[in-house]
Structures are given as structure tokens and as C-alpha cells.
Amino acid sequence: MINKQRNFTILHTLFLNTILAGLYIAFAQLGSLLIIPPADATLFWPAAGIAFAFVYLYGFAILPGLLAGVLAYQYLIFSLNEPPWTFSQHLILTGFFTSGVLVHSILGAVLCWRFL
């Protein structure tokens, strides 16, 4: 079991959050290359593994970096593509997607801490 009570400095935590945000964006872009048309689905999402690994290894202190990475990727996708939605509809969809990423990363890490 991993020691979840780590004492990181603020700079170290900020550095980890920045690295996580960048890695999430990079691996989400990589995952978007794996999309199979016409369903716009992918077999796996590499960014999910990055998100889970960081939450598992570093705890809840890196959740702001994960949130920033997910929101930045969604903004990037929204600004490059013209979806058939309004901006407010896109914000709602982004909120659902972001909450899903956060919940699955937290739940996966908590279950691993508990049972492994």
C-alpha cells in the first residue's frame, strides 16, 4: 500500500500539476489520432491511464492539474472544430466529461489503495 500522506512542498506540487496537465493534453491528442470513423470512438484512451497513474502515485493534491489538463484539451478541441452546439451547450458537455475523468481517476486510485 502506498503512503498517501506525502509532504510535498508547494513548488513540487505545482510542478507535478503542470506536468500532469501537459501530459494529459499530449496523450489526449495521441488518443484522438486513434479515433475510428464514423463512430468517433477509440479502443482506449491513453490520457485516462496517465490521469489514473498520477492520482494513484501522488494522491489528491494533483487533481487541479488534471482538471486544468482536461479543460485545456476540451477548449483546444472546441476551438479547432466547429461543433453543432452553442457555447453554453459545450460548457455543459465539458462539465460532464471533466467530472467523468475526475471520478474514474479518483475511484480507481481509491480502490487500488484499498484492495492492493
Image (cartoon, helix red, strand yellow):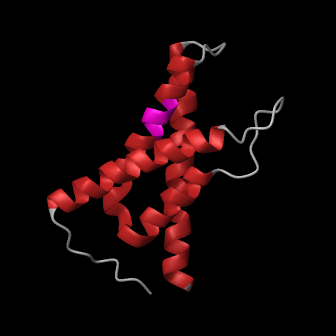
Q: Does the magenta stretch include residue 83?
A: no
- x, y (%) of residue 40? 76, 33
Q: Is residue 3 left or right of residue 91?
A: left
Q: Is residue 71 magenta?
A: yes
Q: Is residue 38 left or right of residue 114?
A: right
- x, y (%) of residue 50? 51, 58
| Quadrant showing the N terminus | bottom left
| Residue at image coords 31%, 49% | 18
Secondary structure mostly seen in the magenta stretch = helix
- Count of marks overlaid on the render: 0
| Quadrant showing the C terminus | bottom right
Q: Quadrant of residue 78?
A: top right
| Residue at image coords 53%, 32% | 94
- The vertical placement of 39 against 16, above or below, is above
Q: In this view, does 34 lie to the left or right of 95?
A: right
Q: In which quarter of the image is residue 82?
A: top right
| Residue at image coords 43%, 64% | 55
Magenta-drawn segment: 70-74
- x, y (%) of residue 113? 48, 79
